[in-house]
Amino acid sequence: MIGATTDHHSDLAVVTGGTRGIGRHLAEGFARAGYRVLLTATDAERARVAAEEIAAATGATVRGTGLEVADAESVRSFAATVYEAESETGTNLRVLVNNAGRIERTEGPLWEADPASLQAVVEANTLGPLLVINALGAHLLEVAAQTGEPTRIIDLNSGSGSRGTVEYAAYSATKTSLFRIAQSVHHYGYDKGLRIFEMAPGVIRSDMTHGMPLHDGREEWTREEDLVDLALALASGDLDAYSGRFVRAGVDRPEDLAAAAGSLTGTSRTITMND
């Protein structure tokens, strides 16, 4: 990985939804890279167990806590937990990974979908990141100002957000909405030291993806190490030119992105309507 460093003993990485699947890979990846890690799950006990397992496997300091990303009170309480983790470990929050999310295995025509499921997808995937950034954004700016080093947010986006997937209208809409959130965060935060990236994980082999009709018969899967390498490269600062933009694990290699950074235009890797 370009610009790799293992000197992250004073850096805290938060990974929401970090107990399984993509979030688990990312939590382990940041831990192995030397970060102190705080991961979340809707079930606090599951988060605690996952943290203990990752700590045992990596030797890193890992903590788990409960979080309902779409509940404002839960998010406020979580922010206090983040500050507590910083104090206890002598770290600064440097990376926030908005991974917690939801997809229904089948969605289909909207008029056939369960309204409660549609609402749950929107709340987890759009309201969740909004509330988490609302709660922690000012603190990320404070850390950047105090340390003189940028802080970074990585949103787990999707090809469904950039191109759309007709079988998953609600899910696609929520992932597209992250582009607009990132646009605003980049606008208000970049000059003050806050970066934000939209990262698609590719198609990682998991219980969820195996159960989705969309992936029936799939033989090619994104490698977990490609996902982790890209996330760590975004967190490192080597790819800050891509703040507010979209990258995809398994397709975009960090070294290729770095080489192409100088050719980016104002709308490169963003969602913009052509006239």
Image (cartoon, rainbow, N blue to C red):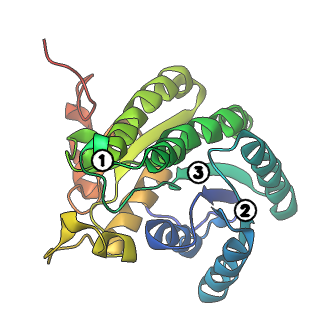
The CA distance from mark 3 to mark 2 is 19 Å
For disc 2, the marked residue is: 66
Residues at marks 3 and 2 touching, judged by CB atoms closer than 8 Å:
no
| Residue 76 placement, left or right of 237 | right
Amino acid type, mark 3: Val
In the rendered structure, which amino acid carries the disc numbered 2?
Answer: Gly
Name the residue tied to disc 1.
112
Q: Is residue 273 above or below residue 175?
A: above
Q: Secondary structure at mark 2?
A: strand
* Residue 142 makes an appearance in the image: yes
Q: Residue at x 69, y 81 (%)?
A: 49
- Which of the marked residues, 3 or 1, is nearer the chain's N terminus? 3
Q: Is disc 3 placed on a helix, strand or loop? A: strand
- Circle nearer the viewer, 3 or 1: 1
Residue 155 in the image, given as x and y percentages of width and height: 46, 47
56 in relation to 144, above or below = below
Which residue is drawn at the image coordinates 46% and 48% (left, top)?
Answer: 121
Q: Quadrant of the N terminus?
A: bottom left
Report which quarter residue 163 is drawn in: top left
Mark sitting on residue 95: 3
Labels in figure, total: 3
**Closer-to-camera residue (239/172):** 172
| Kind of residue at disc 1 | Glu
Few, some or many C-alpha atoms within 10 Å of disc 1 (few <14, some 14-19, many ≥20)? few
The picture places residue 52, in percent across and down from the top left corner, at 70, 82
Mark 2 or mark 1: whose residue is earlier in sequence? 2
